[in-house]
Amino acid sequence: MLAILGHTLSRGGRATMPVVFGNASGALLLIGASVAGLSALLAALPHGLQMLKWVGAIYLFWLGLRAFRAKERVSDPAGRADSPHPPRGSLRGAFGRGVLIALSNPKALLFFGAVLPQFVDAGRPALPQFAIMATTFVSLELTMTGFITFAAHVLAPALRRSRMAERTNRAGGAVMMAAAALLVIAPVQTR
């Protein structure tokens, strides 16, 4: 949420929508991997989950550091940072950033692996049931992150004022770096 919020404030709502869709796609990949048994495989590997946790923490820290050190953006007189023509390749990069945000959360893989099977009726085919659950989760994810993007876009003119933008970037970056530190010290539970 913080990465999407920060992206919206720095680049605008329209430029953040690919991040939102990338994040939902990453969650869908995690659900698919979980259903395919990746969570059990990672739990069985002695250090697999620990390595995934460290990769996620490093990526989250990097995002936080970038936000913390970000210089305020100069917006147009109407207070919009959106340009009518985003730079070439930026949609793909933003989508990829969203996917990486989702994939860098090792606890999501365990969550899906632990929670989804509990809602499967053994007397019915499993794949359609997982498809319904995945569709439901991705719809909720898109709704929530889309709402965060819209709200941040609406509030952006006030939040982009030079002092406020710097404080928002630093606060968001500090929270992401703190979350990375908490991720590092949190024990990994496989069961």
Image (cartoon, rainbow, N blue to C red):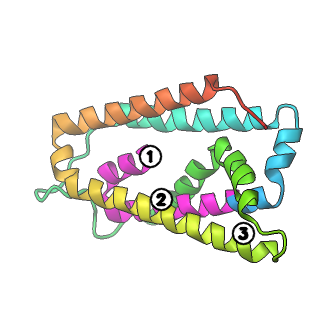
Q: Which span of residues is magenta-colored?
A: 1-30
Residue 136: percent from left, percent from top: 57, 69
Relative to 91, 111 lies left or right: right
Q: Amino acid at mark 1?
A: Ala
Q: CA distance from mark 1 to mark 2?
A: 9 Å
Examine the residues drawn in magenta and state their main secondary structure.
helix
Element under disc 3:
helix
Q: Earlier in the sequence, mark 1 or mark 2?
A: 1
Residue displayed at 74% across by 52% down? 113
Residue displayed at 17% across by 38% down? 162
Residue occupied by mark 1: 3
Asked if the residue at tag 2 contacts the one at tag 1, i.e. Cβ–Cβ closer than 8 Å, the answer is yes
Residue displayed at 52% across by 58% down? 93
Residue occupied by mark 3: 130
Q: Earlier in the sequence, mark 3 or mark 1?
A: 1
Q: Residue lying furthest top in this view?
A: 185
Residue 61: percent from left, percent from top: 52, 32
- Residue 138 placement: quadrant: bottom right
Asked if the residue at tag 2 contacts the one at tag 3, i.e. Cβ–Cβ closer than 8 Å, the answer is no
Few, some or many C-alpha atoms within 10 Å of disc 2 (few <14, some 14-19, many ≥20)?
A: many
Q: On residue 19, which mark appears?
A: 2
